[in-house]
Image: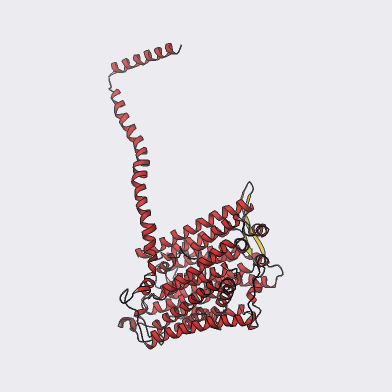
């Protein structure tokens, strides 16, 4: 089965071609069937590969597909790497991708671009699979750029709305900034190791000394790429705006797959980062700052999808913080659990929006618990999971990251703990504003309130089960578990483990850390309940009644406005100057000058063409005499 890994990305590619080419002729039933079947077939093969890999003694297989680039001493095959890390990513991408495809059959049913939407989804899955399967940085980069393209297409799917089209452009441009760093890193990797193959680069890197300047530069540039793709400071503002796309897009790209590409890339390159402790320190600081800032912004947002968007940025910050302190297992564990509960929450939000006739402002909701029971129950499970309450999945993965952070830096741990408390508050705030109290929407909206169809609620139920039970793949030793996930991923992080040493916390300390984290989350939940259920507080309209930090938080700390003032406007002025001085006066002036010169010269020379034969004879004789004089002068 492992040798058939090339089939996994092939199915979504075929789905893209069939639905894309037949978008104007295929009925929606066929489009749905082809789109969903393509991803389910990939999931089935991925499951077979995963099961076979568990039973195999060897845990890493490179499967060549075809010879690709060969020039001089450059040899880059198009091949796939199957190991514990890539096999788990295959299951996440195809498994959750399939559920989102099924959900989309109901959510997008009445959209005129139904077939085009499914073709884009299939293409995204194809490129994401390339990204995680590539056995070298070049194949990974193809998938990296491909998912960037698909995110542009899907975010701007409703491009007739100018603000949605602008959000797509913003995501595309900001991702290109990070991608440039990744691309330069790939060139430096080849220059340093004379290869871009993981199987060649990583063994060579493991023999280098810690803190080598080449490794620091390479990892710093790789991290720039991760910052763009995974929405970290300062390149995070594209992700909240990306909520302009259909809700299934938010769930697929901005919760479960694309935004975790940066974490996957660093986890894959773990030995390079382990031997570049300076870069790891930067990764931890950026992750910590991002998780806190995004959580602080989410506290006051009133758009249900914006709350989840900033929550995603914050949770990605936790993952980067884990990577920065060397907790590669914990960071990837959180990738898995986050994929479950965040996809669930986004799809649940889509169910609410669907029932509310496209209303997204939580101030106009309320009292939906009885009318949307399945959506409410499943979203509550996802909320408990992301808040880090036991025994749901988020508790285990977040606790593992916090424990490693506590080992490394107590101040970092304290800030991360405050971020976790913020998470519990804004998530339960979202739930209470949406589902509790009295309905605050219009009479027309209330008349049309209804639970979503089975095509939308069944994926919610499956994801709720995964969110509740997914953490049991990583039960820590303090609870008597063997942490199956850590054991499975051990071969991937083996080289890094041999270069570092962790001081394992004693069980008493671990219990205290867990108790503090859970206790703060419960306090945040109770405060949210008291404020938004008992007191029935409704957030003020826009900036009315908001002052100080609340006003800053609601306006996202004016970061977009700061970027606009410091970067966008100066660049617009500079580009206008370049257009007028360099482009028009310089380049155009030179080119047009040649044209004008030729035109003026021709106006003068044409006077010689008088049409008088006598004049022509005179000029011919004059020319002959001139040649004779010239010849005599030369002699």
Q: Nearer the viewer, residue 37 or 92?
A: 92
Could you say which is closer to the camera, residue 413 or residue 628?
413
Residue most toward the right? 57
- Asked if one can make out residue 509 in the rendered structure from this viewpoint, the answer is yes
Residue 433: image location, x then y, percent: 39, 82
Residue 555 position within the rendered picture, expressed as x and y whole percent measured from the top left: 36, 70
**Vertical position of residue 313 compared to residue 569: above or below:** below
Left or right position of 610 against 10: left
Residue 487 appears left or right of 182: right
Name the residue located 42 percent from the left edge and 67 percent from the top edge.
242
The quadrant of the rendering that contains the N terminus is bottom right
Q: Nearer the viewer, residue 247 or 316?
A: 316
Snapshot quadrant of residue 50? bottom right
Q: How many marks?
A: 0
Write down the quadrant of residue 353 in the picture.
bottom left
Viewer-nearest residue: 264 or 30: 264
Does the rendering let one see residue 16?
no
Above or below residue 631? Residue 150 is: below
Which x, y percent locates residue 418?
48, 76
Q: Position of residue 405 (x, y in %)?
A: 57, 72
């Amino acid at each position: 089965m492992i040798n058939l890994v090339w089939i996994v990305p092939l199915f979504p590619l075929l789905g893209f071609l069939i639905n894309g080419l037949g978008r104007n002729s295929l009925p929606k039933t066929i489009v749905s069937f082809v789109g969903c079947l393509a991803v389910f077939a990939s999931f089935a093969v991925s499951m077979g590969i995963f099961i076979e890999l568990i039973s195999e003694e060897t845990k890493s297989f490179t499967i060549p597909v075809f010879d690709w680039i060969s020039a001089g001493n450059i040899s880059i095959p198009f091949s796939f790497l199957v190991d514990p890390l890539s096999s788990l990513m295959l299951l996440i991408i195809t498994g959750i991708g399939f559920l989102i495809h099924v959900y989309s059959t109901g959510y997008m049913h009445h959209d005129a671009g139904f077939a085009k939407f499914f073709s884009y989804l299939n293409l995204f899955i194809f490129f994401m699979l390339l990204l995680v399967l590539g056995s070298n940085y070049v194949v990974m980069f193809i998938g990296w750029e491909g998912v960037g393209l698909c995110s542009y297409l899907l975010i701007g799917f409703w491009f007739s709305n100018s603000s949605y089209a602008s959000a797509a452009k913003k995501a595309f441009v900001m991702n290109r900034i990070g991608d440039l760093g990744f691309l330069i890193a790939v060139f430096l990797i080849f220059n340093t190791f004379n290869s871009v193959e993981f199987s060649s680069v990583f063994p060579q890197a493991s023999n280098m000394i810690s803190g080598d300047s080449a490794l620091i530069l390479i990892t710093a540039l790789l991290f720039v790429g991760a910052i763009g793709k995974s929405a970290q400071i300062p390149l995070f503002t594209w992700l909240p705006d990306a909520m302009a796309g259909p809700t299934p897009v938010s769930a697929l790209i901005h919760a479960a797959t694309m935004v975790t590409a940066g974490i996957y890339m660093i986890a894959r390159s773990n030995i390079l980062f382990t031997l570049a402790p300076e870069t790891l320190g930067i990764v931890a600081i950026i992750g910590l700052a991002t998780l806190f800032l995004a959580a602080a912004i989410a506290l006051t947002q009133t758009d249900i999808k914006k709350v989840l968007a900033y929550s995603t940025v914050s949770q990605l910050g936790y993952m980067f913080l884990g990577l920065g302190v060397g907790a590669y297992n914990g960071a990837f564990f959180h990738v898995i659990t986050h994929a479950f509960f965040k996809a669930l929450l986004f799809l649940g939000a889509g169910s609410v929006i669907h029932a509310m006739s496209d209303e997204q402002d939580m101030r106009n909701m309320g009292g939906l618990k009885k009318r949307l029971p399945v959506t409410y129950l499943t979203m509550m499970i996802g909320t408990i999971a992301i808040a880090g309450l036991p025994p749901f999945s988020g508790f285990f993965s977040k606790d593992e990251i916090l424990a490693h952070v506590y080992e490394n830096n107590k101040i970092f741990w304290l800030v991360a703990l405050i971020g976790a408390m913020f998470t519990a508050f804004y998530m339960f705030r979202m739930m209470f504003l949406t589902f509790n109290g009295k309905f605050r929407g219009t009479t027309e909206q209330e008349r049309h309130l209804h639970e979503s169809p089975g095509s939308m609620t069944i994926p919610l139920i499956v994801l709720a089960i995964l969110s509740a039970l997914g953490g049991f793949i990583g039960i820590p030793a303090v609870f008597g578990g063997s942490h199956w996930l850590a054991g499975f991923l051990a071969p991937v992080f083996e080289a890094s483990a041999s270069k570092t040493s962790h001081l394992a916390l004693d069980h008493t300390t671990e219990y205290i850390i867990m108790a503090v984290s859970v206790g703060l989350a419960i306090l945040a939940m109770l405060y949210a309940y008291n404020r938004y259920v008992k007191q029935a507080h409704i957030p003020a309209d826009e900036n009315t009644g908001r002052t100080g930090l609340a006003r800053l938080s609601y306006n996202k700390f004016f970061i977009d406005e700061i970027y606009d003032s410091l970067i966008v406007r100066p660049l617009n002025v500079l580009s206008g100057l370049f257009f007028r001085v360099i482009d028009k006066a310089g380049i155009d002036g030179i080119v047009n000058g040649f044209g004008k010169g030729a035109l003026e010269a021709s106006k003068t020379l044409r006077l010689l063409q008088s049409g008088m034969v006598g004049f022509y004879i005179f000029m011919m004789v004059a020319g002959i005499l001139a040649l004779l004089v010239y010849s005599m002068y030369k002699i």
